[in-house]
Amino acid sequence: MSGVQYSITARDLCLWYGKFQALKNVDVKIQHGLITGLIGPSGCGKTTLLRCFNRVNERYGYVTTTGEIKILNKNIYDPDVSLIELRKSVGMVFQRPNPLPISVYENVVFGLRVHKERAALKKSTLNQAVEEALTEVGLWKDLKDRLQTKATGLQLEQQQKLCIARLLPLKPEVILMDEPCSALDVEGARAIEELMFELKGRYTMVIVTHNMAQARRVSDECIFMLLGELIEHARTEDMFLTPANPKTAEYIEGRYG
Amino acid sequence: MTVASNPSPRTQFAETRLVRKKHRSELIAKCFFGVMAAAMVIPLILIVVHVVKQGMPSLSWEFLTTNPRLGGIRGGIWSAIVGTLYIVTISLCVSAPIGVLSAVYLNEYAKENWFTRIVHLAVVNLAGVPSIVHGLFGLGAFVYAAGMGKSILSASLTLSIMTLPVIIASTKEALASVPVSFREACWNVGATRWQTIRRIVLPNSISGILTGVILQVSRTAGETAPVMLTGVATFKAVEGTGLFLYNPFTDQSMALSMHLYYIATQANNAPPSLPYAIATVLLSVVLLVNASAIGLRAYLRSRKKW
Ligand SMILES: Nc1ncnc2c1ncn2[C@@H]1O[C@H](COP(=O)(O)OP(=O)(O)OP(=O)(O)O)[C@@H](O)[C@H]1O
Ligand SMILES: [Mg+2]
């Protein structure tokens, strides 16, 4: 044993949308505490794979999944797994920042309100959770006097950070990010990337991106997918310098869209 | 290098004949559509002015607050106003909760399967059934089969059945207008469907839901055929002028719509201004309710933004 801990271990994962197979026998191990980039051309199944990790795909009735995914050594497709508890541990951040149309404060404590008994939610606990989470994402200074304003009125970058902050009070193991910067300008993207560095080590992050430069900058490991198959999974430097698979090389050099 | 087909910079972006022609048809189209839109307003104004003017001689505070006498052709309309109030209130107290809750079920919980397809079909078809048919149904179902007799309750329930599909449809629309991204945000922190609905979906669709419900008030107040068959009398003498004139479980009542119909078509010797006065009251009720719906929606809208 090398002592490497894996947060997510997927074995032989297949997924169908109706008759269309979007994931084909994906095997992947994602290391604890690292940032793993997920790259590949449009429609190759990045979002789909990401959404398997917190089982949000199943919201559509016509999705079938086979194989297993272990998170914290528990197969999340076991029948005794509660989706509610799973999503507490595996949070997701979307392409478009989607703060809820309530106050900044309520956004941050939303998870706690949803998961904890009302009696366990003392005002002081909530206040502390808000301060901790906002500090962690670097919003506390800017927003501490505006906690009661509507979150939907913030700048996009702040909204996206808030969406990350919203996950933190639940102490997630994994944070999934689906193109978290693509709705932001360069500055905003940079800020989110820095935030990811800040969070590294405490949380395992999986980030889908179309931006090669970004994948290179932020990720420790990289996964390349093509047409629903996992083509290559390697340390980021290795993948970008000496890709093992010629298809990976072609993609990185920009030969597919 | 010069461009051969380009005569001189002076005429470069000038209007050509074709452009002028386009402008002209644009203008004509705009005027035409504008006139059509205005034509919508004119009948409304004409109706209101005509009705109010004709009804003026009978209208007075007296008229509103005293009960009808002599089979309805003398006196006021207080008991009819109260009857309408009872019927509208009871019927909405039944149809609003049922309609809103079933719409929430259909929009938020139900998966696409044969059961929901049947419910959808029923809703759509029920909305298209003429009101007189609802009246017949109410007569058979509530008055006879359920043994409620001709009563305010039967009439109200009949109207509930009639408004239910519309409330379901409008509520579903209001719910569907809440962006999916909010729901996704909720699911992704592990909120159950009910938590999502209670904390996010309902607060953000309440304006639409309420508007839909309120608009049914005016519809219920205006219906004649269904209530005539199920619990509204052409004339009913009552004592007193309070709000508690009827026992809704056993009594028949009068109602504005029915009273108007009766006075306008059946009653002899009624003053010619009487039906118009009743119509004025009915119209005011309807317009008032609609205006309050619009006001409420505007108010709730102004408080939410995303
Ligand atoms: N809800 C769905 N129903 C049916 N097919 C879907 C659905 N979502 C995705 N697909 C299909 O599955 C395949 C993978 O989609 P996915 O969204 O995972 O790709 P992606 O790699 O995230 O693409 P992009 O980079 O454009 O976001 C695509 O061919 C897509 O058409
Ligand atoms: Mg995607």
Image: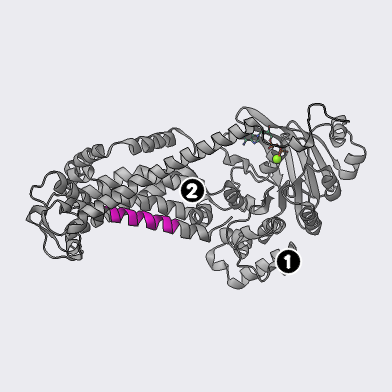
Q: Is residue A93 magenta?
A: no
Nearest the viewer among B110 and B85 is B85
Q: Residue beneath label 2, please?
A: B175
Magenta segment boundaries in residue numbering: B283-297
What is the chain identity of the residue bearing mark 1?
Answer: A
Q: Residue at 46% across / 45% down in the picture? A: B173
Image quarter hosting the C terminus of chain A:
top right
Q: Which residue is mark 1?
A: A135
Residue B299 can be seen in this image: yes
Question: Is B257 left or right of A196, judged from the image as shown?
Answer: left
- Labels 2 and 1 within one chain: no
The quarter of the picture showing ligand 1 = top right
In the shown orientation, is residue B113 left or right of residue A36? left
Q: Please tell me how crowded label 1 is: few (under 14), some (14-19), or many (20+) other residues with Cα within 10 Å.
A: some
The location of residue A182, given as percent across then percent down, is 74, 47
* Chain to which mark 2 belongs: B
Q: Position of residue A225 (x, y in %)?
A: 78, 35
Quarter of the figure with residue B93: bottom left
Locate residue B141, reporting x and y percent.
22, 41
What residue appears at the point 48 percent right and 53 percent down from the top-left corner?
B205
Instruction: Please name which of the two marks, 2 or 1, marks the residue nearer to the observer.
Output: 2
